[in-house]
Amino acid sequence: MSDIAPAEFRGDLPIEEFRRYAAQLIDWIAEYLAHPERFPVVPRVRPGDVAAQLPPAPPARGESLADVLADVERVIVPGTTHWNHPGFFAYFSISSSIPGILGELLAAALDVNAMLWKTGPAATELEQVALDWLRQLMGLGPGWFGVVNDTASISTLLALAAAREAKPALAIRARGMAGRADLPTLRVYCSAHAHSSVDKAAITLGLGHENVVKIGVDDAFRMRVDLLEQAMERDRAAGMLPLCVVATIGTTSTTSIDPVGEIAELCRSEDVWLHVDGAYGGIAAVVPELHDLMDGVHLADSLVVNPHKWLFTPVDCSAFYTRQPEVLKRAFSLVPEYLVTREQDEVVNLMDYGVQLGRRFRALKLWMVIRAFGAEGLAERIRWHVQLAQEFAGWVRDEPGWELCAPHPLSLVCFRHAPPGTSEAEREALNARVMHEVNASGEAFLSHTKLGDRYVLRLAIGNIRTDRRHVARAWELLRAATAKSPAAGPGARS
Amino acid sequence: MSDIAPAEFRGDLPIEEFRRYAAQLIDWIAEYLAHPERFPVVPRVRPGDVAAQLPPAPPARGESLADVLADVERVIVPGTTHWNHPGFFAYFSISSSIPGILGELLAAALDVNAMLWKTGPAATELEQVALDWLRQLMGLGPGWFGVVNDTASISTLLALAAAREAKPALAIRARGMAGRADLPTLRVYCSAHAHSSVDKAAITLGLGHENVVKIGVDDAFRMRVDLLEQAMERDRAAGMLPLCVVATIGTTSTTSIDPVGEIAELCRSEDVWLHVDGAYGGIAAVVPELHDLMDGVHLADSLVVNPHKWLFTPVDCSAFYTRQPEVLKRAFSLVPEYLVTREQDEVVNLMDYGVQLGRRFRALKLWMVIRAFGAEGLAERIRWHVQLAQEFAGWVRDEPGWELCAPHPLSLVCFRHAPPGTSEAEREALNARVMHEVNASGEAFLSHTKLGDRYVLRLAIGNIRTDRRHVARAWELLRAATAKSPAAGPGARS
């Protein structure tokens, strides 16, 4: 190693700068949250525009935070897609609430890494407490162990890894899967409408994309249990081993809800791990009238719901539950000498329950959100979103030339403009054009999916700041885009 | 689904509450950062103490943020291990700086999920820019593509997954590894001192813990390239396939630095992916005199360094670089219809480069840290930590009855009290007792490791608020703990 120059203590920036610029930033954020429509929801930038406004090299000397914050306003904000805009209806709409933002601020200041109980007793225990509260809010019974992950992608990966470990005779943790003649092909099942994170988990874990078996759905896009049973039988007959089923409460395309209870009975008789992906839809169970979303979940082995999706908690915060924490721990626990602690046998050490060693204090914001809104306040807000979606669906249903394309049990509506006499290809071009026109308005942001060969639009409500007028405005923009459209009649092209 | 009750718009808390409690929280944080020694670094709580102070069920109605913040002070803070305490010398010391905290606050307010360029153009492009800046700071040449992950555990997992995908003939992404007669056993190599995240990645990916081959080290705890070469030869002779080598810049136990250049030459001739784990140590390359830490890294395939470890960026922020982004993308890209965007072929969509679909705006805090301190300011602070560690090592070296246990090229010192005539078992008991006594003081927090059969203490400097007096105080506490110790002489027991 080279000789290094003599140094002296510099420390952090002066605390007065924290006070000054934090106050300035709080002011800015207050205005931002108070006027969430000030910026276009989809920014008017093209690829490369943001990077082109930033210097290609880091500054040699420190710059004033005044300059940094000025560049945030000049470059970053105009280049940002505003997920907190109440006209954000694309994908699954999310939003960060005031208690959640304050929780994240506090977590950044404390900077806890709760890899071990010892390195974050409060963070570790609050994670257990907050997730137990959330379990109760959803009307789930006891017997669940919860940990917070960053994303549902990771939560679902943990579920599949636990499913693998639930068959200890396979000895996959120790021996792996490659180069072994004694292992059967391992199969994972989900509906054709399950989220791509199931595929990605299977790919990552080395199970193989081809071994994710997509089960057909019924007219309401729900997994068909008869087809699931046939697929497992066929696989067993071919010498393969069914490892895990992923059922979805609220699929991404349509929020269809798989028949979890029936699937669970089948999984139990087949000795297959059942993971329930309720990343978006499961959260709605915090509305007491929607507790039945959790029907059958008490028979599942694991469950993911995302407070960062529809519970007003800033990204990232994914709640992963399992009824078999010892299996999850067996899959992931690894304690090198430098992480040994005296109390390790009497505490939860979060590092034992997943891939990541480092753990942010994510429970803080969730706990603050639950406390600030309370059970009733959370239910009221989710209920409102469901009601707005039902109203929007009513408007579509009643409008000639438009159609609903799927059931809408929660807060997502799939629909399209379908003028009589137009072909599927024409409808795709028409709706794609309409969507891009609406999105270009800066007032609303919708996304799309395909249901069979139908290209359909998705309007997803989930932002804490979305009122009826935002949904009404989106509907107005949609109709205006078709009214002036040359494609409104048969034979038109975009 | 049940009929749900009628609802009305509630929205977020009133903006005045944000202004009021944000100001209160900023005040609290300012005091916290200005007096970082106010709380004991290791809290005086026992397992269950924190949870016992919290209600077992969530509140029915929303509570005032005043009450929530009061409980933070009453329950959470006294139960927190204070990573921001300048006496935190355990594991690898980390800290969150003022610009980093403000960046995290802003990210929480914007709540961007940059899964696609379209859903976060600024977040996506700033991630590229900030990581390119960091690359330049470390003295690395061009040709690297960077993405921000939550942890080095995930970054290393991505590296091993890319290594697997770099052999397309294995067809593991599509076909998986189980039930295949055509696949050889796949092997991963790292030194016996590599981080446990390598093991965990291999376990997760289904490669198997047994297939992580631990290569012996030299007297300075550096991987022996001759032994690595022999291990690969032996494995090939046995029909196994060497897939990946992980070299470490700054191992966890001692911050030893593997000979990356030599290892890279071998990997190149063996057609094996080389991943460099510089999670902690790589960051030190931002000091110009320490650029040589990166010697040979230009020949590697991937690299991880963690700005949340030693670059004053709040957890989480792990920088993952690869020279083969197309392989990483091949390993992970999966674009369901609902995530298709028009510009997808001309932009970086972050979801294509890893397991997680959801992506926080983590680059913002890193960019703000780099700008606020500048290249020189960051180098000055890291240089100071290295200098302090060298001074501490000098104190240990000069003190009778104490010994240094490993080279200390960076800011970690491994040492122990080793009174003449004591046995290894006595020394372990003695040093463990000394460590627990020092940690119980609330003024310093050290951790331990084992080097062979030697139980040694680790003093790791990396907190932006650590000045010489904090290190001196730790040394004082250590000596005091042995001075009053009945174990200070031969034959004593703790």
Image (tube, coloured by chain):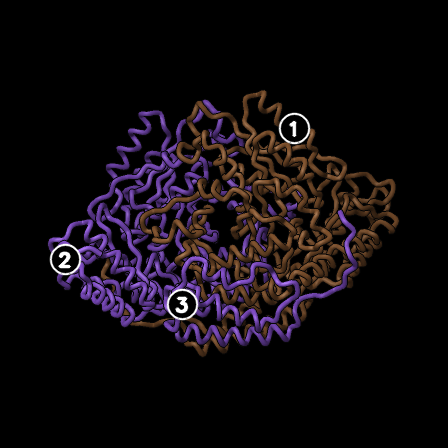
Chain colours: A brown, B purple
In the depicted view, which residue is nearer to us: B48 or B195? Answer: B48
In the depicted view, which residue is nearer to us: B291 or B214? Answer: B214
Give the structural element (helix, strand or loop) at label 1.
helix
Give the structural element (helix, strand or loop) at label 3.
helix
User: Image check: B95 left or right of A273?
Assistant: left
Image x and y of residue B204, in percent: 45, 40
Inter-mark Cα distance, 3 to 1: 61 Å
Q: Residue at point 27% right, 69% down?
A: A7
Give the structural element (helix, strand or loop) at label 2.
loop
Chain ID for label 1?
A: A
Q: Tell me the amino acid under the disc marked 2.
A: Pro
Chain ID for label 2?
A: B
Q: Residue at point 71% right, 45% down?
A: A254
Q: Which residue is mark 3?
A: B374
Q: Tell me the amino acid under the disc marked 3.
A: Gly
> Which of the two discs, 2 and 3, labels the residue nearer the N terminus?
3
